[in-house]
Amino acid sequence: MLMNMRDLLAVAHANHFAVPAFNMSNNMLLRGVIEASEEANSPVIFAIHPDELAFVRHAFIKTAIEEAQKMSVPVCIHLDHGSSIKQIMEAIQCGFTSVMIDASTQPLEQNIAISKQAVELAHAVNVSVEGELGTIGTTSPQAEAGTEDIIYVNPADVVTYVNATGVDTLAVAVGTAHGLYPKDRKPELRLDLLKEITARVDIPLVLHGGSGNPDDEIARAVKLGINKINISSDIKNAFYQTCREVLADQGLYEPLMIYPACIDAMKKVAHHKINLFNAQGKAALY
């Protein structure tokens, strides 16, 4: 069941759970996410970054749309961290049902202006829009783009931005970073900021960089109003760590022999996240 993120997260917002947004850049990851979501009867978001879209090409989106339409659970296909109107338009033309406009490194006035333009274009064709305030950190060159230093969201700006742009959902920077955290770096969410934000606006909120954060912090963030959590590195790391182990048998070359174990490994992580986000069984609410 393919739908936009406004409708998908409205149910999550009303019922106090978070929908996992799994980043994917190949058919094996897509298959694992589909299987885990249907097994858990959980709504799901297929998240694809512009760099991933350039890698998998537009034909992959056609496959994702076809699979989503056949699924027994609600699905949204979402552009993650679109940074320009050109990228937003490309995603809409590809068939994405939701887009993110990330102008968070710009001054607030410019962020509002570009976000408002994205909303006007997307809403005209029933595509939902996610915006962002504050900046997400980054942990390695492999991770999605982020800033060297995390700029925490200003709760006062949230009200201004939401009212001025009409975005359907908002990513708020409260201390996460893209990628896997190194051993000497301890992630810590500013849950006090999250409380202040949810007291000011009634809109589904998004947590980016959800890989590697302590489970108890993530669970508390969901209870405080986070309705979408992005997961990329955790599922990819599980997939490719297992891939390395399987390929230790240097005689293997057949994908049918190599990838099933890798898919199973990433599915275990996906199931854990679905349970942590309180999303298991929630497809029944749609």
Image: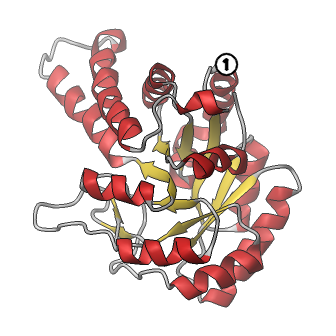
> Quarter holding the C terminus?
top right
Q: Residue at x 52, y 60 (%)?
A: 206
Position in image of residue 233 (x %, y %): 33, 48
**Measured along the vertical axis of the image, is residue 43 above or below residue 12?**
above
In this figure, which residue is indicated by the disc labeled 1?
Answer: 70
Q: Is residue 201 above or below residue 79?
A: below
Give percent across and percent down for residue 270: 37, 34
- Mark 1 residue crowding within 10 angstroms, few (<14) / some (14–19) / many (20+): few
Indicate left or right for 157 with 124 as reference. Answer: left
What residue is drawn where x is 27% and y is 18%?
261
Amino acid type at circle 1 is Lys
Q: Secondary structure at mark 1?
A: helix
Identify the colour scheme used: secondary structure
Give coordinates of residue 164: x percent, y percent.
76, 80
The residue located at (14%, 17%) in the rendering is 250
Residue at 70% across, 81% down: 112
143 horizontally vs 214: left or right: right
Residue 72 figure quarter: top right
